Image (cartoon, rainbow, N blue to C red):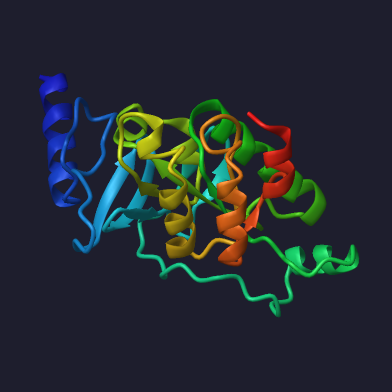
Amino acid sequence: LAASLCVLATLGIAASANIPLRDSALNLRSTAFVPGAPSVLSRLGSKSFVCKGRACNAPRAAVFRAPLLRSVPTMVAAPERADVLVDDAVSRFVKSRGGNLPIRKILIANNGMAATKSILSMRQWAYMQLGDERAIKFVAMATPEDLNANAEFVRLADSFVEVPGGKNSNNYANVDLIVRTAMEQGVDAVWPGWGHASENPRLPNTLRDNGIKFIGPTGPVMAGLGD
């Protein structure tokens, strides 16, 4: 009886929040995202996202506590490019070292361990150097396989964009997709991880042409190293 009541309660909560069940009450996510579709609430593991089209954003109230995050489901603003005139911890850090490109938002163009370790490392750096682990925002690229697996890197990111699944030429090795996603999400830089498109000179070259920083070697240097 107690188990039945728990199941009914879970179904009631899911129905009231308009969240379709998938596999179990502990593994909730929305159905496939369609570009231009109305905003929906999606849950990945213990984290909530607000989705519109193929882009899903974590609420601004989310607090980083690895490996899980707690958040309050609210609508978030549309992505914007960072304003170099904003006076914040990132811009002050960059200015103090003679730089002129504050990086406040990064697209993680990889998945799995590479993506997870990059987000955790950069958040730790931001906390130690800037006093705020949320000073830099992360946008993850996530395939349906990543979402079905409740991938840790997606839950750690501030937002994610669903990309096609299957072979990596459909997603993490697809330079055109990475650049288009970076531009749509208004990021300042792209972190490619290792493998996939990280050794393709066309990625840093195309990002440079669109005013986006590639976190890695320049295209000519990469081309000189060969494959």
Q: Name the residue furthest bottom.
A: 85
Residue 194's spot in the image, x, y percent? 60, 31
Rendered residue at 74%/63% (across/down): 90
Q: Nearer the viewer, residue 212 or 94?
A: 212
Left or right for 42, reference 150 = left
Question: Is the residue 127 above or below the residue 183 in the image?
Answer: above
Q: Nearer the viewer, residue 96 or 123?
A: 96
Rendered residue at 71%/80% (across/down): 85
Q: Name the residue furthest right.
A: 97
Question: Is the residue 197 above or below the residue 3 in the image?
Answer: below
State how many labels appear: 0
Observer able to see residue 84: yes
Q: Quadrant of residue 98?
A: bottom right
Rendered residue at 67%/40% (across/down): 223
Q: Quadrant of residue 216?
A: top right
Q: Nearer the viewer, residue 151 or 14?
A: 151
Left or right for 123, reference 200 = right
Rendered residue at 55%/70% (across/down): 81
- Please identify the quadrant where the N terminus is shown: top left
Q: Nearer the viewer, residue 9 or 71?
A: 71
Residue 88's spot in the image, x, y percent? 73, 70
Residue 22's spot in the image, x, y percent? 19, 31
- Please identify the quadrant where the C terminus is shown: top right
Observer able to see residue 105: no
Residue 40's spot in the image, x, y percent? 23, 56
